[in-house]
Amino acid sequence: MNEIEVRHEPAAARFAAEVEGGTAECAYRLRGGVMDIVHTEVPHAAEGRGVAAALVRAALVYARAQGLRVRPVCSYVQVYMRRHPDTQDLLER
């Protein structure tokens, strides 16, 4: 698989990537110093190829760089963060 090119679209409050079948996205809301990651979606044709993980990774890297806390509303992001202990310090408590 080719490397997934994720772009940040602040005006749309999402991280996105063009993949087979369309656009994949990880949508968020900013409130104060908290990033609520509310939705992750990948077209069926691109499922199982690491696209969602790449989007979430990009969102978490951005949150860390901006000094934001993360509230994982999306169930995929909740599981991702549980499986990656190095992201636990970002969780809003």
Image (cartoon, rainbow, N blue to C red):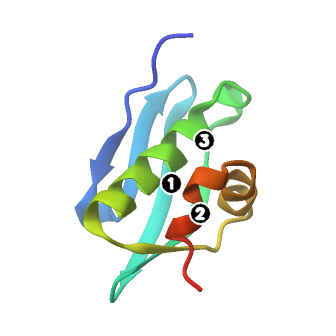
Q: Position of residue 4 (x, y in %)?
A: 45, 25
Image quadrant containing the C terminus: bottom right
- Corner quadrant of residue 62: bottom left
Are the residues flagged by discs 1 and 3 in contact, CB closer than 8 Å? yes
Q: Position of residue 85 (x, y in %)?
A: 66, 53
Q: Residues within 10 Å of mark 3 (few under 14, many from 20)?
A: many
Q: Which residue is mark 3?
A: 52
Is the residue 84 above or below the residue 64 in the image? above
Number of marks in the rendered image: 3
Q: Position of residue 23 (x, y in %)?
A: 47, 39
- Corner quadrant of residue 20: top right
Q: Which residue is mark 1?
A: 26
Counting residues from the start of the chain, the first of labels 1 and 3 encountered is 1
Query: Which amino acid does the dot numbered 2 rest on?
Result: His
Q: Is residue 23 left or right of residue 46?
A: left
Secondary structure beneath dot 1 equals strand
Are the residues flagged by discs 1 and 2 in contact, CB closer than 8 Å? yes
Counting residues from the start of the chain, the first of labels 3 and 2 encountered is 2
Q: Residue at x 42, y 36 (%)?
A: 17
